Image: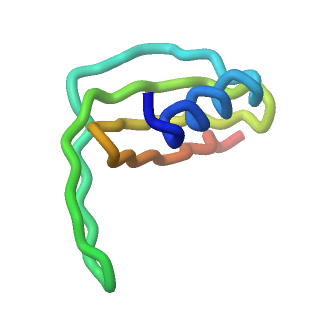
């Protein structure tokens, strides 16, 4: 297992995040000084501490994530 993946899993565990679901796919693309794209299995986790929903995807040595803070 790659070091970055270990850290991501450890961060979810330490932060008190609970994995909710693993879905079909997360697709993302970005441009700028670095451009790229990823299509990977999506994983969602709810972090009670901070009230944030984390949606992540990783494929080989590339990962992408987004944090969603519900209003209220």
Q: Quadrant of residue 60?
A: top left
Q: Quadrant of the C terminus?
A: top right
Identify which residue is drawn at 45% across, 35% down. 2
Residue occupying the point 38% across, 46% down: 63
Nearer to me, 7 or 72: 7
Point out the residue furthest to the right here. 49
Count of numbered tags: 0
- Estimate the x, y position of residue 6 in percent, counting from the top left: 55, 31
How was this image coloured?
A: rainbow
Q: Nearer the viewer, residue 26 or 34?
A: 34
Q: Residue at x 21, y 22 (%)?
A: 24
On-image quarter of the N terminus:
top left
Position of residue 36 measured from the top left corner of the image (x, y, whole percent): 22, 64
Using the image, determine if residue 12 lies above or below residue 52.
above
Q: Looking at the picture, does residue 8 appear above or below residue 19?
A: below
In the displayed structure, 18 sits above or below 41; it is above
Q: Nearer the viewer, residue 3 or 44?
A: 3
Side (left or right) of 5 relative to 39: right
Residue farthest along the bottom direction in this orientation = 33
Q: Position of residue 49 (x, y in %)?
A: 80, 30
Relative image position of residue 27 (x, y in whole percent): 22, 45
Looking at the image, which residue is at 72% across and 34% down?
A: 51
In this orientation, which residue lies closer to the viewer: 6 or 22? 6
């Amino acid at each position: 297992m790659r070091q970055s993946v270990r850290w991501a899993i450890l961060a979810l565990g330490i932060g008190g995040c609970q994995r909710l679901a693993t879905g079909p796919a997360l697709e993302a693309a970005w441009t700028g000084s670095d451009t790229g794209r990823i299509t990977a299995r999506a994983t969602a986790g709810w972090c009670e501490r901070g009230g944030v929903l984390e949606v992540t995807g990783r494929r080989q040595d590339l990962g992408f994530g987004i944090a969603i803070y519900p209003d209220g």
